[in-house]
Amino acid sequence: MDRFDALRAFVRVVEAGSFTKAAQTLHMNKTSVTQLVQQLEARLRVQLLHRTTRRVRITADGAAYYERVVRLLADLEDADTSLSSASVSPRGRLRVDVPSPFARMILVPALPAFHARYPEIQLDMGVSDRMVDLIGDNVDCVLRGGELTDSSLVARRVGELQLGVYAAPGYLQRAGTPVHPRELEDTHHRIVGYLRARSGKVAPAPMWRNGEHLDVQGRYVVAMDDGNAYLAAGLAGMGVLWLPHYMAAAHVARGELVPLFGDWHLEPMPMYVAFPPNRHVSAKLRVFVDWVVELMVQHAPIAARPDVGAASPGPQSAQDRKPLKTSSRSGR
């Protein structure tokens, strides 16, 4: 038995919750993973996992052993990256998941510069607006937008998206140009709905102007759970959109979208990088997060909020670091 492989297999089974998922993320077959864990248990003479036909649960001894093994594997990685060559050039495979519009418009176009700076980092990038199980899917980190509420993950606030309201000229020709956000709730106006991943519902948009506050719900004939599709529906004239400025800017310049309600403000969307609390923050993860921060400064910097009165929350630091879970909002 290779003890290192056995320890890695045990940790992945615990994190993934099944031998099958663990085998997939380790690029091994299920039989090999099962044998490694069995051999580890035989060597320790302790049952680490309870196995049933439906699920795998960790034992009390297994939980205590898992905590020590995770630290041991992290220390081994630290030992590797402490070598001068590794410190100068972080290397290895990094698994990340990012919102589809942010990937298409900002992250992917900037990848050549990241690769030139860190040629030995291999990025496995999931591109989606879905909820991600970081532990089960063996993902090192996710980039997501919106306030995060669950305490199962650790997150770093890396930026803030300023939002605006937009519509295609064709839509405005048909429905008329609204001058007040409440008009979007009239029978002849429509929005494009954005479905929140967690609830599957379209949430209202909070807006304010001077002392006036309102939540705009609107009616829709189509709702999307993907940021790119959401934008495409708006460009096709299906309704009014709430968009980050970075997604709208080029389309406004080409006359494909028209800004609405310029004297109204929307709550900015904070952007977070989140990762599991037990996941070692390796050199490659650290430089990736720093690179994302650089991109956010260029494309979606944190801006001072207007004075909206006591009812509105105050500004937050760009370096907030608190236990959080992935959001139901994308970076759209």
Image (cartoon, rainbow, N blue to C red):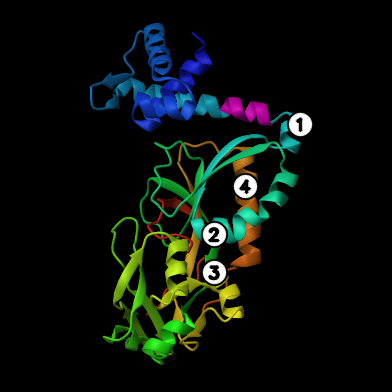
Occupied quadrant, residue 174: bottom left
Of the residues under marks 2 and 4, which one precedes in the sequence?
A: 2
Identify the residue under disc 2. 102
**Residue type of the residue flagged with mark 1:** Ser
- Residue drawn 62% across the image and 66% down it: 299
Earlier in the chain: of badge 3 and badge 2, it is 2
Tell me the distance, in whole angstroms, between the alpha carbons under discs 2 and 4: 15 Å
In this picture, residue 316 sits left or right of residue 290: left
Which is closer to the viewer, label 3 or label 4? 3
Span of residues in magenta? 75-81
In the displayed structure, does residue 253 sit left or right of residue 45? right
The circle on residue 85 is: 1
Give me the C-alpha separation between circle 3 and circle 4. Answer: 22 Å
Q: So how many labels did they put on this image?
A: 4
Mark before the other along the chain sequence, 3 or 1: 1
The amino acid sitting under disc 3 is Met
Question: Which residue is depicted at the point 40% across and 12% down?
Answer: 35
